Every structure is written in C-alpha cells, then in structure tokens.
Amino acid sequence: MFKNLFSKKGFNSKTGFFKVEKDSLIEIEELNGKGSINDCIETIGFPTNHIYIVHIFDSDKISCLGFTTLTKNLQFVLAENKETKISFSDVLKAQKKIDWSFEYSDLNIEDILEEGIEMENFDLNFLQTVTNLSNEGGNLYKSEKFGIYFQFENDILISFSSSEWENSSTKWLKDVNEEMVENFKKEANKFQRNEIEAMQEVNAQTNALLNIPEAMGNEYIPLHTKENGNVNLYNLVIVHYTQDCKKDDLLFINKGRYQKIDDNNYKIGSFKFEFGNDNELKNIYE
C-alpha cells in the first residue's frame, strides 16, 4: 500500500497522497473507500478528527497538509493532482507559510475539542500525546500550552474550559464579596456534572448581577432568594428585564432545581416558564 520515496527529486503518487515519515515522502498507492481525504486519514491509521487539515492555497503543487490534531506533526500530503510531482522541499516551503496562530486560534481549538467530545474519541492518552497534561485532582487535567482545563469520564473527554475559569464579573464580585461567590460555587457543585460546568453556572450568575438595576438592592431580590440564602440572579434578569432565554440555557443554570410540567413548561421557584416549539421563551407566569 505504501512505497518509499527517499530521493530529493519530485515524485507523483497514484492516489495523490503521500504519507510523511521523518524527512521522506511515502507514496500511498491505494486508499480505502473512494479516495477522499477522510479515506486517506483512515488508511494511515487515524480517526478522521485526529488529523487537522490545512489547505494550501498559494501552491501549484500541494493541495493540503494533514497534521496530528492540535500539533504541527505532519502526517500526510495531498498533491494538487495525481500527475503533480512534489519533493520534501516543496512540503517544507508550504509548511513555512502556515499561520499557526490562525489555524490553532481559540475558536478553532474550541471546535476541535467539541468535535472530539461529540465523537467520544478524545481520550486521556491521545490528549497526553498532543499536549502535556497535569492532573489537577480526580478527572480534571490542565494544559499549560493551551490554557485549558479538561474534564474526563472513564478517560474520555467530556468537557473543557479556559484555565481562566472565573470570568471578569466573577473576579469583580470575588473582590467585593468573596463569600457570595463561594456560596454560588457550593450550590453549583451540588447539581452540575463537574467543576467546569459548575463554574459556567457561577459565571452566569455573577454576569447577571451586572445587568440588574441597583444590584443587590434591586426590588425583585426577595422573589428570587432561595432557602440557602443565594439569589438566582440569572432568573431575576430573565423574569423582570430581558424575558429572553433559550430553554437549554435556563435548564442548565437551574439543573436539578426546576420542576418539569411538560416539554414546554417548567417551574422554578414561584415562577413558571413557557417555551415555544423553537425552544425560545414565550411566557412567564407567577
């Protein structure tokens, strides 16, 4: 299936694909499937989302390069066509033009990780090979390289978060009233699946505080104060000010603390929330 090409001269490939090993190109003589990029990835032994594709638009010889996801480790090359002859020096020239700050921007990394979670194939061993992970206790790991916390379940990635867990509103409130933030954390940890999701809840609550007139002196505070003394600031903003919310967001922030009436109606505290079939908030009743 593979043919070694050690010479510095240019070579073409029957499939257009070359496997990369050290400083040499290895012709991929046949592919599984119909000859797509995904077929190539599987032929060389990777799950499709474990390879990151970079398209080369300013080369008349190379169409794209495939790297181990989240790294710069080159795994294969696709020539512009089956007749195009390329050498390893052509590959090096193409690599030098890649803007890695764009390719591995925060947004792209987020998409990569989300796909890994969806496909349930970003396991602890794989992520250890692409970034050094330090254990932060239990199933929580941190990557200094990417500034990301990773949460695993049975060694499979289930969630991730920036290492700056606390958003700007949480940091601000922590300076003003640290006890309030800690109480938010204690409650969130009781209901959310992991520390990352718990922190997302806390950040949503503290961010809501910045959108409430007169803050903790707001007239509606008593209506949203719970038995534990915490105030559901997120719900307060929705009920009395924006009335704009998606069902999934409301249920996430109130996980384990809402009563389901039916698929479109939920009760939280003394308020009932009605959603349309588009999952957008339709009505609020007290």
Image (cartoon, rainbow, N blue to C red):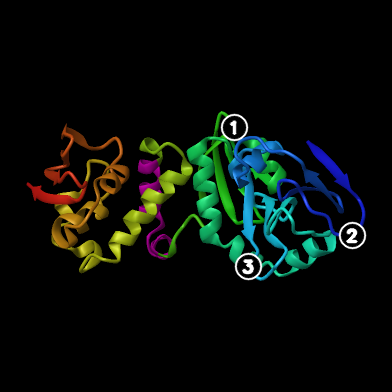
Q: Is residue 63 left or right of residue 111?
A: right
Image quarter (top left, top right, bottom left or bottom right) of the N terminus: top right
Q: Which residue type carries mark 1?
A: Asp
Does residue 132 lie above or below 64 as drawn? Answer: above
Pointer 1: what residue? Answer: 155
Query: How packed is label 2: few (under 14 Cα within 10 Å), some, or many (20 or more)?
Result: few
Between 89 and 150, the one nearer to me in the picture: 89
Sequence-wise first label, 1 or 2: 2
Q: Can you tell which mark lies on residue 9? A: 2
The Cα atoms of the two marked residues, 1 and 2, are separated by 45 Å
**Other residues around mark 3 within 10 Å, as few (<14) / some (14–19) / many (≥20):** few
SS class, disc 3: loop
Q: Secondary structure of the magenta portion, mostly?
A: helix
Q: How crowded is mark 1: few (under 14 residues within 10 Å), some or many (20 or more)?
A: few
Residue 99 lies within the magenta run: no
- Residue 177 seen in this snapshot: yes
Highlighted magenta segment, given as a residue range: 169-188
Q: Is residue 173 left or right of residue 162?
A: left
Label 3 belongs to which residue?
57
Most foreground residue, 266 or 228: 266
Compare marks 1 and 3 and give the one earlier in the sequence.
3
Percent x, y of residue 46:
67, 38
